[in-house]
């Protein structure tokens, strides 16, 4: 038969275990990245965004030159058709950043021509950040819906992870379209102090268990 004191000790042990599990779960859940897709679906009409700043899903886009949030039919068969709205860069560059200034990552996005066949359409675009720069080529083929310009999915191959800003620019300020940018809030690694406290808690729990057994 167990004494009241031994039952109380077991109850305290159980409570301490639960607290430590909760703390560890909370700390390591901070490392889970939250993904979002910037698809401009909140817009229902064409919107010119010339040399200005606008936000979409907690991200800020800063534009130079002439740009438009467009949909199918904006510039006829030489512009993409994906059944929704997208961002059409009409020359000049634009930058993408987290509105609150946090780090983020861009894993992939849809890239399409704009005014395909015209002298001012971009044959490739350049993405640049503080850590990397890379070019992505447009295929220049009208193989989308109804022989319209298509979107290609671009995988950034982790070149733009943990950045504060990414700049998109078309070759010779040429036109291009983007949509469905898959962005992730960068993983937040628990601070060393928090990990140290968790380690001390676990060590203290183990020591107390050994002492009781002795």
Image (tube, grey):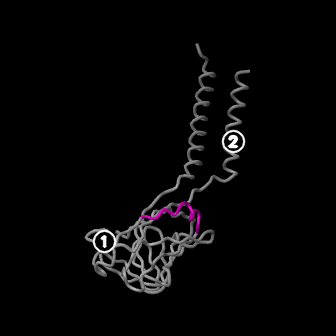
Give the quarter of the image for residue 132. bottom right
Element under disc 2 = helix
Mark 1 vs 2, N-terminal side: 1
Q: How many marks?
A: 2
- Residue 111 percent across, percent down from the top left: 42, 70
Q: Which residues are magenta?
A: 153-163
In-front residue for pair 16/120:
120
Residue in the picture at 33% in, 77% down: 79
Q: Disc 1 and disc 2: Cα gap in Å?
A: 55 Å
State left or right for residue 125 relative to residue 21. Answer: left
In which quadrant is the N terminus drawn? Answer: top right
State left or right for residue 133 relative to residue 44. Answer: right
- Seen in the picture, residue 32 relative to 91 is either above or below; the reply is above
Q: Which mark is residue 107?
A: none
In-front residue for pair 109/49:
109
- Residue 115 percent across, percent down from the top left: 36, 81
- In reply to whether residue 155 is colored magenta, the answer given is yes
Tag in front: 1 or 2:
1
Mark 1 = which residue?
A: 81
Residue in the picture at 44% in, 65% down: 109
Q: Which mark is residue 199?
A: 2
- Residue 133 percent across, percent down from the top left: 58, 71
């Amino acid at each position: 038969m167990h004494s009241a004191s031994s039952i109380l000790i077991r109850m305290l042990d159980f409570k301490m275990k639960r607290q430590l599990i909760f703390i560890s779960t909370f700390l390591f859940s901070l490392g889970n990245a939250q993904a979002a897709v910037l698809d401009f679906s909140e817009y229902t009409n064409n919107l010119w965004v010339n040399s200005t700043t606008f936000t979409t899903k907690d991200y800020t886009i800063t534009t130079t030159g002439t740009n438009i949030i467009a949909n199918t039919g904006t510039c006829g068969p030489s512009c993409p058709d994906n059944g929704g709205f997208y961002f059409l860069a009409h020359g000049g560059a634009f930058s993408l950043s987290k509105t609150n200034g946090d780090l983020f990552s861009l894993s992939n996005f849809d890239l399409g021509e704009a005014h395909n066949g015209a002298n001012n359409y971009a044959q490739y675009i350049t993405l640049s950040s503080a850590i990397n720069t890379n070019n992505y080529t447009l295929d220049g083929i009208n193989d989308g819906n109804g022989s319209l310009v298509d979107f290609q999915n671009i995988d950034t191959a982790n070149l733009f992870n943990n950045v504060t800003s990414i700049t998109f620019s078309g070759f010779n300020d040429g036109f291009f379209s983007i949509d469905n940018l898959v962005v992730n809030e960068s993983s937040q690694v628990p601070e060393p102090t928090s990990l140290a406290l968790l380690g001390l808690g676990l060590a203290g729990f183990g020591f107390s268990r050994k002492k009781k057994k002795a």
